[in-house]
Amino acid sequence: MTTATALALAAEVRSGRRTARDVVEEALAAVAAGNGELNAFLTVLGDEARAQADAVDAEVAAGRDPGPLAGVPVALKDNLCTRGSLTTCGSKILEGWRPPYDATVVESLRAAGAVAIGKTNMDEFAMGSSTENSAFGPTRNPRHTGKVPGGSSGGSAAAVAAGFTPLGLGSDTGGSIRQPAALCGVVGMKPTYGRISRYGLVAFASSLDQIGPFATTVEDAALLFDVLAGHDPLDSTSLPSIPEPTLASVHDGAEGVRVGLCRDLIDGCAPDVVARVQEAADALAGAGAKVEEISVPEFAYGLSAYYLIAPAEASSNLARYDGVRYGLRVDGEDAAAMNTATRTAGFGPEVKRRVMLGTYALSAGYYDAYYAQAQRVRTLVMRAFDRAYESVDVLLGATAPTTAFDLGAKVDDPMAMYMNDVCTIPSNLSGHPAISVPFGTGEDGLPVGVQVMAPALGEAMLFRLARVVEEHAPQGAGS
Amino acid sequence: MPGRVTLSPEDVRHVANLARLDLSDEEVELFTAQLRTVLDHAADVAALDLAHLEPSSHPIALHNVMRADTPRPSLDREEVLAVAPDVEDHQFRVPRIGGEAP
């Protein structure tokens, strides 16, 4: 079990005190011992990871610096393309598929000396909040194996929470990094839209999807973010600006920072979650922040708008699974019958629900009432954020309304499952960065996550405030 | 603008067909009920008067993203075809399209 931070491991490997191979063998052994129970990894990249570790050690031996993540094991969500290695998106329709290219983030990790040790479980095509929609069985929460880890990036959250790897990558379309981070008691962060390249991230809802880090500490999350942030000509939505480094200022504190304790990101949450957020606000005030209560009532419309926009984009993106070029094919007498047979057999129920919902929202007669209207709500939410950021620097609230729930509790009630995303969705609609930091536990002893939100490109401020929250977190299962 | 929409089983069959999905009668019944619940929740949004706002398709708008028109290697053809369900003569092979015999 790996308990060292990525910063500590990379320092040891870069200085030659420990080999990358040794670090990676330890991670692989932890996965071999513990993954059977948790099902966090769908694929373990044993040989590839050993070869990559040896390459890092060769760099060190030759007197070269292998990079800021030298020898650090990383868990990759299984919707990130890895050349020649299985990439399933948690779906039968991509079972056995080996992409012919690497995602840009996979290349960035390698260039920084990190070692990908496996691909993690997820809700099918990232549609879900519990990782129970995976075609390959649910992941269990390492803090309590009768509970869900959250989702859709539940496998990466669980891998980091279990100590398999100090770092993980997920994707966040409506909270799919932050919510599982909260439920598993780790740090999870969604960057500004366009700050990290989406090239090689299998698309769910392209205007909302963003890749981001999981870690056990805010420092490690900032370290990983700094490695991945930057412009990529292969992603036309990648931001052209040079990213501001965040790790160097992570300990700059909260003195004088204006924090808006957002009622709309707390009201409706469980009382124990509300209590932790209030304590985090008090801790920030104690650290010199100017905390004030703020209301952004427009956030209330975010959930409905999201569950029209995301399915609409998904229905278009998932049209590519037609049995022609890759993945599953189920034969039919003509091409249309083959398309239908393939998609019917290959997609699980949640994907079918969302594809149909999106198709409906985009169809003649309903487009204006649903899809265009949801896009106007998106404008409404973005303007509401702008107004809030005239009086505060960051917003503070809950990440998820409750602690981790029982496996199976919400699988038959899609709307109850969607409600898990109510606090995380606004940042996806606006494209702003947000982070979940573990902050104590609920009455059930399970982790609670506190969410900090910042304006576009406010990652440095976000990590600073998150670090202060982390510093004051009560010790317990969540820390 | 519909305040409260009643999604019918026929609507579900129609969108399933558009989305190239084949549903059993039980699935039509289940999905009709589940999608109705989601659309009922969305009635709050559908009922808002937002005519004064422009729809946003992206959070951070970038316009006319161009790159230099320089040749660069594309994906390896054999590597791409190696993962295809059916290949003939370096091309994707599919069943016949439309009603004509091959």
Image (spheres, coloured by chain):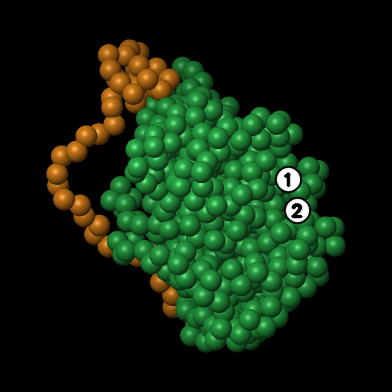
Give, as a three-letter code, the residue at label 1.
Asn
State which chain disc 1 sits on: A
Q: Residue at x 24, y 59 (%)?
A: B64
Q: Position of residue A42 (x, y in %)?
A: 60, 32
Seen from the viewer's position, the closer of residues A224 and B10 is: A224
Q: Residue at x 43, y 51 (%)?
A: A68
Q: Residue at x 38, y 51 (%)?
A: A197
Location of mark 1 (residue): A141
Q: Which chain is orange?
A: B
Q: State left or right for residue A151 relative to residue A403.
A: left
Location of mark 2 (residue): A404
State which chain disc 2 sits on: A
Rendered view: B74 above or below A417: above
Q: Residue at x 69, y 44 (%)?
A: A162
Q: Which chain is green?
A: A
Q: Which mark is residue A261?
A: none
Determine the CA span between mark 2 and mark 1. 8 Å
Q: Position of residue A408 (x, y in %)?
A: 78, 43
Q: Position of residue A334 (x, y in %)?
A: 43, 20
Image quadrant assignment for residue A298: bottom right
Q: Quadrant of the C terminus of chain A?
A: bottom right
Seen from the viewer's position, the closer of residues A39 and B67 is: A39
- Do tag 2 and tag 1 residues touch (Cβ < 8 Å)? yes
